[in-house]
Image: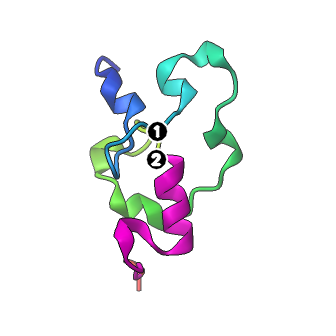
Amino acid sequence: MTDTNININCPICGGSNNCCYGKDKSLGECWCTEETFPEGIFAYVESEFIRKACICKNCLEKYKTGTLFGRPLTSLSD
């Protein structure tokens, strides 16, 4: 991929995703490999970024607690 910002920015909030795979794969295992990303969170990611940019830990935790975007979430699949 030629645009490195795609790899280092969260596709939901635009902040740093702190994914070492997007920065330097020689850094070892990334925090994201130990996490579970619920399928529903990908509804908040534009299709062009799915499997190309890591969601940041902050957005992941907010999604899991139902407070992404500062308000309770409703399921898009309901």
Residue at screen point 40% across, 29% down: 7
- Find residue 67 and report its horizontal and vertical position in percent: 45, 72
- Find residue 77 and report its horizontal and vertical position in percent: 41, 79
- Find residue 19 and report its horizontal and vertical position in percent: 53, 32
Q: Please tell me whether mark 2 sits on a helix, a strand or a loop.
A: loop
Location of residue 76 with respect to 43 vertically, above or below: below
Please give left or right for residue 13 compared with residue 28 in the image: left
Q: Amino acid at mark 1?
A: Asn
Do labels 1 and 2 touch, CB within 8 Å?
A: yes
Q: Please tell me whether mark 1 sits on a helix, a strand or a loop.
A: loop
Q: Quadrant of residue 1?
A: top left
Please give left or right for residue 77 compared with residue 48 in the image: right
Q: Amino acid at mark 2?
A: Ile
**Residue 17, numbered label:** 1
Residue at screen point 37% across, 36% down: 9
Residue 70 part of the magenta-drawn span? yes
Q: Which residues are magenta?
A: 56-74
CA distance for labels 1 and 2: 6 Å
Please give left or right for residue 18 compared with residue 35 in the image: left
